[in-house]
């Protein structure tokens, strides 16, 4: 299912300034754990704002894991096997994903790093026709840059405690979280436990 422009914009907002905890490739799915800015329907930030996203029957995943800053052309590229991907995030303290665009962003950003791949795994032949999800991160205090592109049809989202959220609910929670951020000036560092 191709994501509409309207839903793309809403998902981009919900994903903005989220932080990657880990990404794991399983038999026929990719699981991503992100800390998102999200406020529930009771206008409370949950005890834990991490969300698990499961992309079943994904088309392709490409990862560039480099020992250097984002603009360092000669940064060492770390080769990664599928089974090693999750472990590469252990012990990292990654910064937030800034930029406002993550879903179906076109080829420009991917073209900047597609020749610097640590991992490139094709799961379905028709991946070129699927939606794309672009993620990126840098490690605080260390020269590590991670770029990821995932091709997918659709996904499911769960809160950290295992409750499945409808995509519309996830979007609404993100909108409430960002509205509260603008209203109170909270930062992305203290939104997990503060209540307003």
Image: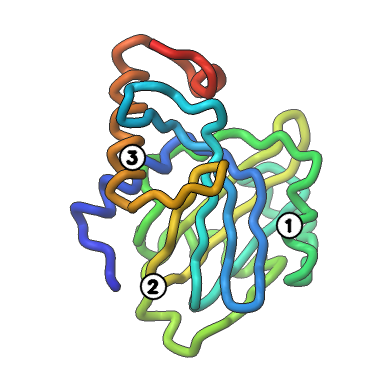
Is label 1 in a helix, a strand or a loop? helix
What element does badge 2 sit on?
Answer: loop
Looking at the picture, how far across and down is residue 185, in whole percent? 39, 11
**Residue located farthest toward the bottom when viewing the structure as drawn:** 125
Look at the picture and state if 74 lies above or below 119.
above
- Residue 13 - label: 3
Disc 1/disc 3 C-alpha distance (Å):
25 Å
What residue appears at the point 62 percent right and 46 percent down from the top-left corner?
71
Question: How is this picture coloured?
Answer: rainbow
Please tell me how crowded label 2 is: few (under 14), some (14-19), or many (20+) other residues with Cα within 10 Å. some
Q: In this view, does 127 lie above or below 150?
A: below
Residue at the spot of label 1: 86
The reply to whether callout 1 and callout 3 are in contact (CB within 8 Å) is no
Q: How many labels does the image show?
A: 3
Picture residue at 79% right of the left edge, 64% below the top: 84
Q: Where is residue 175 in the image (x, y as percent from the top left)?
A: 29, 33
Whichever of callouts 2 and 3 sits on the residue coming sooner in the sequence is 3
Residue drawn at 66 percent across, 71 percent down: 26
Observer-side mark, 2 or 3, equals 2
**Which numbered disc flags the more N-terminal residue, 1 or 2?**
1
The residue at which mark 2 appears reads as 153
Q: Which residue is drawn at 48% across and 47% down?
A: 163
Element carrying mark 3 = helix
Mark 1, Cα crowd under 10 Å, few <14 / some 14-19 / many 20+, is: some
Left or right placement of residue 169 versus residue 71 in this view: left
Real-space CA distance between mark 1 and mark 2, rounded to the nearest whole angstrom: 22 Å
48 to the left or right of 73: left
Give the label on residue 14, or none: none
Taking depth in this image into account, of 13 and 168 the one nearest to the observer is: 168
Are circles 2 and 3 on residues that touch, CB within 8 Å?
A: no
* Closest to the observer, 168 or 188: 168
State the CA–CA distance, disc 2 to disc 3.
20 Å
């Amino acid at each position: 299912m191709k994501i509409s422009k309207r839903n793309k914009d809403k998902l981009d907002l919900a994903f903005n300034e989220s932080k990657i905890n880990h990404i794991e490739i399983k038999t026929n799915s990719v699981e991503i754990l992100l800390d998102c800015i999200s406020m529930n329907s009771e206008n409370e930030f949950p005890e834990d704002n991490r969300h698990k996203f499961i992309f079943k029957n994904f088309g392709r995943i490409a990862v560039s894991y480099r020992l250097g800053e984002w603009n360092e052309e000669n940064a060492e590229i770390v080769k990664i096997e599928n089974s090693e991907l999750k472990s590469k995030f252990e012990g990292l303290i990654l910064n937030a994903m800034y930029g406002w665009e993550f879903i179906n962003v076109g080829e420009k950003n991917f073209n900047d790093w597609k020749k610097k791949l640590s991992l490139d795994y094709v799961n379905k032949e028709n991946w070129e026709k699927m939606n794309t999800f672009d993620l990126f991160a840098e490690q605080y205090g260390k020269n590590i840059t991670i770029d990821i592109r995932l091709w997918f049809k659709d996904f499911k989202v769960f809160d950290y405690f295992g409750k499945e959220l409808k995509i519309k609910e996830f979007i609404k929670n993100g909108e409430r979280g960002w509205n509260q951020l603008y209203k109170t000036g909270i930062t992305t560092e203290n939104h997990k436990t503060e209540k307003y």
